[in-house]
Structures are given as structure tokens and as C-alpha cells.
Image (tube, rainbow, N blue to C red):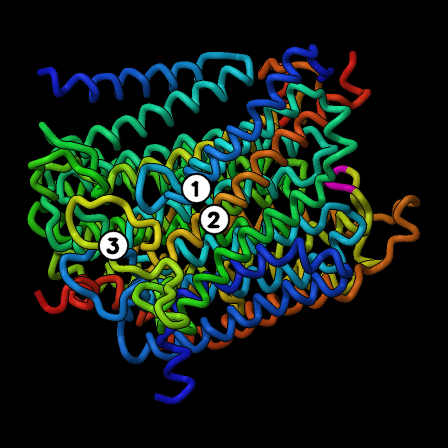
Amino acid sequence: MSEMSKIVRTISNVIFPLITIFGLYVIAHGHLTPGGGFQGGAVVASGCIMLLAAYGSAWAFERIKEKRLTAFESLGAVWFIGVAFLGLFVGGIFFANFLVGLKLFDNFTLFGNIPVVGSTLADINTGGVLPLMNFAVGLKVIAGLFAVVLVMAYASSLKEWKK
Amino acid sequence: MNLLDVLIQHSPPLIVAVPLLGAFLTPLVGRINEKVRNIFALVMISITGFFIALLASDVFTNGPRVYVFGAQNLTLPVVRVLFEVDSLSIFMAIVTFILAFVALVYSWSFMKENDGLDKYYTLVLLVVASTLGMELTGDIFNFFVFLEISCISSCALIAFWVHKGESLEAAFKYIVISSIGALFVLFAVGIFYAQYNALNIATLANVIQFTFLDKVALVLLVVVLGMKAGLVPMHMWLPDSYGEAPPSVTIVIIGATQASLYGVFRMCFTLYSGAFQNITISESTIGLIIIMLALLTILIGVLMALIQTDFRRLIGFVAVAEIGYIFLTIGVGLVTLHDPDMIEVGKTAMQGGIFHIINDCLDVGLLFLVAGAIYYATRETSLNEMSGLARNMRCTTIFFLIGLLAVSGIPPMNGFASKLLIYQSTYQLNPIISIIAILASIMLLAIFVKVFYSAFLGPKISKFENVKEVSKSMLIGMGVVSCIIIIFGLFPNIVIHYLVEPAVNALLNNAQYISVVLGGV
Amino acid sequence: MIYNIPFIAVVVMIFIGLYAVVFRRNLIKMVIGITIIECGVNLFLITLGYREGGVAPIYTSLPKGTRYPSEMVLPVPQALTLTSIVIGVAVLALMLSLVMHIYKHYGTLDVRKIRRLKE
């Protein structure tokens, strides 16, 4: 696909950071509000695809190599399974939530507070292992969805298609 | 507790998690070197096999074992996902492990000239992980998720040779039928959740009553899982997919098909057994319908295989016919098991059926490996073009002879033992059933003698002058399968006593399956 | 009667999707039909969890006086639906790449002209 006009490119430049921040917010607050790994990852991926559509596929193929996206995707997946195995070694059972109530240094817990049951204001420092897994799934979804669209754009711009 | 006990206690999730970890690490490992990646995949499968052997030695002696994800103890009511491993599950896991190991050893040299092999090994490990997950799980939504994962990864593997148009067509047919089927399984899971507020198989088996919605769910589950296993009239995708995929992929997909067959066993005999005990008329109807469809499967599979000229498509139709034998025993089991004077017939039939699962995988797998070896050496797939290959490829000819004898049910191969059990038990229910089954075996022998004559015997053709024997890793793969076939054929009573009988007893012992989870309620 | 309308919509959507898969010749229309069936099954799962007068099952800042968890809508079908949507995205991506390969190979999207594996 060829690139679009200057107005479209400028507006996408302005909106892309806002979309990314909103998507990362949805990923990070997955244990408190609706959202989580897949939903936030889909939002960020659609922001990246908006840039791909605005700037054209030729620009994207120079800047982004598909091998790096595959490496990010594998990193996200290995992180997810690694946290599950850590639950086996530290917590005693596979997928155990070993960060709840665990004090690392004095008075510092990594997502380890135990929330009060009932209607409260949200505390982001709760949830245990869930926010870490949300980050892993979000990274994998961003890399995966963007790689799918990138490869489809590459495949449709090859010379044999222009019949 | 010593180390072995700890390993046995944690082995159900590790059996699924280790191939999954291997699948996610393969693109990173593949950046180093090719040989390192191949060895890494084999090491991951061997670790899985070690855990399967440990768990099998425990489950066959001590009964079913439950593993709860994320909590140390199981609290009622059950809200967590759990894996419940009984003897039938671990038997299917052993079958899957053998097929996966042979496939990885075989594809070391078979797939060497293709590129994109990083993704090939990732997808094979994903299919193995999802098949093992389907067989070990005790939660019906978890079963649906693993079913979908295996469907997506197998479709990507079937279309691996994208330069041929037929592979793309076979893969598209497969994904359309499989995804619609899986969506109907999700519909049935929704029906179960709406009525009983539970997703756990043991909890559902305890409280199920045979209402109208449950009948709808039973029909949906049996039809969709039968479609994934190859029951007529839903078998259309099977010869296409088995025939157009690379042969080392077909062996892994045979494992996925048998996991769907395991799903039919689990649904009919464990989930619905409480419902079938109270109402006797409807249970016989289901059994009779399955028997009729199974006979139709055997006949159509064999008759369509008679007229084929493409080698791998012919073996695909033979695979359809072999699945029909196993469905025949499911039907006979459902009809006779609640009739007190025919219960021995039912048990013998189920033993024959479950023994036939492993025999069918090994026999049909060996035939596909031989077809792959011929394709690798000569680049030919059509039987009209091949001739006189026995002069150059001696070992492959011997392996094909072993596969021929095994598939037609001739002693001393393993096909004879399981088919004899099937003929014996179905004859006592109704003689016509076993007559049709014996006729089909004879026709299978005729088909493969024709194939043997046209491909291996016959005059020498000039374009096959320089055909050499295939390389060592492919011969090792075929040799391992042939050794297992001959050993199972020479000592079938040892196999039945140690592997098959515990599996059948665990399948029929519904109360034990439920009480391991619900604690004697 | 009004609480049965989502279930009727589910059945209508599944039948429309099946009609598109069975009777249409264009490959892209078959893919769209499968997506419609998936949307129908997801709607069925979500509708199962509805409780009359219920609020969203989130503990953060509930409206005053809500009795939890008896006045909340069931959260488990929402989790099942989410998993199903993710699987649907993956299947859709796979089917569309297969359609692209088929178009590159055969030059047409008509199913009757693509069939080579006939008997």
C-alpha cells in the first residue's frame, strides 16, 4: 500500500502515543478494571497498524524487521511460562500465586498486598502474579498481531500479484 | 518424600508444559544453529517421555491422580482447573509420545532441504503439547481450548508445502470444518454450564440428568468429535489432509485424531454414564446408531481405497476404515454394558477397541513413513509411475511388508491380536457385524498386495536407475515402529494385561473417577 | 418473552453463518460466515450469565448499597467468551493467509475452480 496524504500522516503522529498509552493502561490495570493482556495488546497493535496504513508498506519494511518481532513474541511467551514454572519452584504448585503476601525487602511487596473484600477504591499493588502475566500476554499479542498484518502487507506487495 | 515422589506428583502439568516451553524457545534456539535446534526438540520430547513413564508406573498401580492448578488442596465446590489422569489417559499419552518421537527422528533428514524449519518444529511441538493436554485434562472447557490449539497448529502444518495448490485446498477444507465443529463444542459446553453451573467432568458426571438440552449436547459432542476422528459421513477432510501433508506431519496428526477419539470415549462412558444407567432405551439407540455409522465407515473407507492411484491418499482412506473398527467397539460397548448377561462381550469388545487404537496408529503411521521415503527418493506420488523399487530400496520394502501384514490383521503382527478380539466380541452380538469386518480386512489385504506389486515389484524403469536407499534417520524412525509392531504382535497378552486391561477397567469404573475429585460424595 | 430475544438472535446468527458457508462460492464469504457463527456462539455464552437487576462483577467502586456477590452478573461466562474471541482472531488470521496463498496460486477465489482433490 502506498502512503497517504500529509494530513493523515500528521494526525497519526499525534494520536499514536495516546493510543499506546491507553493500551498500556488497559494492560497494566487488568486485575482491577475490565481489560488485561489480550484487550490492551489489541489496542496497541491497532495503533501500530494505523501507522503502517498511514505511512505505507515500503516505509515499514525498511524500518521493521520481521525477525525482531518474532523474537519479541517468543520473549513474551517464555516470560509467561517462566512465571508459571517459578510458581512451581517457589510456591510449590504449578501456576501458584506466590507473590501474594510475600515481602521482598522491608515493607516492599511486588504486587503483594491483599485487598479488602467488598467495594473499595482500587489498589494497583494487589493481584500477585496476575499483572506480570498480563504484561507477558500483552507483549506477545502486540508483536503477534502486528507481525501478522506486516507479513500480509508484504505478501500483497510482491510483484507476482500485480496481474 | 524423595525426589521421585515429588516428580511423580508434579508430572501431569509438566507433561504438557515441557513441550509448550520447547515450542516457545525454538525460534530463539534456532538462531544459533540448525543441528542445535533439532537436538533441542528431541531433548524436550525425551524429557516428556520420561515424565509420562513415571506417571504411568504410578497410575497403573495406584489409581487415578488429580492435580489442581494454583492451590495445594482441592476444596469443594470445584472452581479451579484440574488435570485428572486415569489409566486410559496415560495410555493415550504413551501412544502420542511414541508418534511424536518417531516423527521428530524421521523429519531430521526428511525436511532438511525445506526452509522455514523454525516454524515447523515450533508447530510440531505445539501439536504434541495440545494433544497431551486434551488427553490429561479433567475440565471440559480446557478440553475445548486444547482442541482448538491442535486444530490451528495442524492446519498450519498441513499447508506447509505452500508451492503446491492441493495442500492449500486440503488445509482450507480442514480449518473450515474444524473451526465450525469446535464452535459447536463450545455451544455444548455453554449448555452444560447453564444447567449445572459446573465445568468439571467429574462434577458434571455426578449431577447429570438426561433432559432435552442434555440430549442436544450429547448429539453435538458425539458428531463433532466423530468428525474430528473420521467417522462417515463427516470424513471428507481426512484423506485430503493425510494425503497432502508432509508425511512426518501426518504421523503427528494421527495422534491428534486419536485424541478426539479419546474424547468420544470420555464423553460416552464417563460424562453420560449416570444418565445412561437410568434410561435404558435411549442408550441402546445411541449405541445402535454408532454401530451402523461404524460399519458404513469401514465399508466406505475400504471401497474408496480400492480405486485410488495416489499412494498417500489411498493410505488416508485405509486410516478411515481402521477408525471404523474402533467406533464399532464403542457402539458394541454402549449396547451391551448395562445388560447383565452380555457384559463380558462388552468388555472384550472395549479391550479390542482400545488395543486397536495403538495398533492402528503404528500400522498406518508406518505406511505413511514408507510413502514418505518413496517420495523423498523418487519425487513420485502416483502409483502409475512407480515400478521396480525393491531392487534399490531394500529396507523400505521390508518395512512396507511389515506394515502390509499388520494392517490386514495377519499373524504374527499386532493387527491380528486386536482384530481377533473385535471379531470375537461382535460375533456374539450379531454375526453380520463381524462378517462385514472380516470382509473389510480381506479387501485391505487385496489393496495392499496390489500396491506392493505395482510399486516395488515389476520391471525396472530407466528414470529410477540412480535411486538410493533413504538416509539413516528415516530408517531409524521406521525401524523403531516396526520393532514395536512385531513385539506387540508376538506378546499380545502381556500388552493386554499390563496396558489395555487397566485402561478398560478405569473407563468403566465411573464411581472411582468421580470420587477421586469429589471425595467420596 | 423479552428475555428470550438474545437466544433467538443466537439461533438466527448461527443459521445465517451456516447458510453463508454452505451456499456461497466466494472464499472470503465463507470466512465471513464462520466469523458470524463465532459471534453467535459468543453471544450465547454472554447471555447465559445475565441476572436481572445485576451490576458488572467488579469490586472497584460499586454503587452504594449493592449486595455482593448475589446482585452481580455471573463472571465465569465472560471469561469463557474472552477465550473464545482470542481463538476466533487466531483462526481468522490463519484462514485469511490461506486465502491469500490460494489466490496467488490459482488467480481466482471461486471454490468451484479451485477443487482438484475430487474423488
Question: Does the rendering let one see residue B204?
Answer: yes
Q: Amino acid at mark 1?
A: Ile
Quarter-wise, where is residue A146 in the image? top right
Q: Position of residue B30 (x, y in %)?
A: 71, 57
Disc number at residue A135? 2
Percent x, y of residue B476: 70, 68
Part of the protein shown in magenta: B380-384
Badge 1 vs badge 2, beta-carbon distance below 8 Å: yes
Under tag 2, what secondary structure?
Answer: helix
For label 3, the SS is helix
Q: Quadrant of the N terminus of chain B?
A: bottom left
Q: CA distance from mark 3 to mark 1?
A: 51 Å
User: Residue B391 location, x and y as percent?
Assistant: 84, 58
Chain letter of disc 1 in the image: A
Which mark lies nearer to you, 2 or 3? 2
Callouts 2 and 3 in the same chain = no
Image point (72%, 29%), residue name: A60
- Badge 1 is on which residue? A27
Question: Which of the labelled discs sits on residue B333, or is there none?
Answer: 3
Discs 1 and 2 carry the same chain letter: yes
Pick whichever of labels 1 and 2 is earlier in the sequence.
1
Q: Is residue A5 left or right of residue B425?
A: right
Q: Which quadrant holds residue B2?
A: bottom left
Q: Residue at x 57, y 27 (%)?
A: A16
Q: Could you say which is closer to the camera, residue B44 or residue B93?
A: B44
Contact between labelled residues 1 and 3, with CB atoms less than 8 Å apart = no
On the question of residue C105 being in view, the answer is no
* Camera-side residue of A102 and C82: A102
Q: Nearer the viewer, mark 3 or mark 1?
A: 1
Q: Alpha-carbon distance for marks 2 and 3?
A: 49 Å
Query: What residue lies at 41% left-to-right and 49% top-to-bottom?
Result: B146
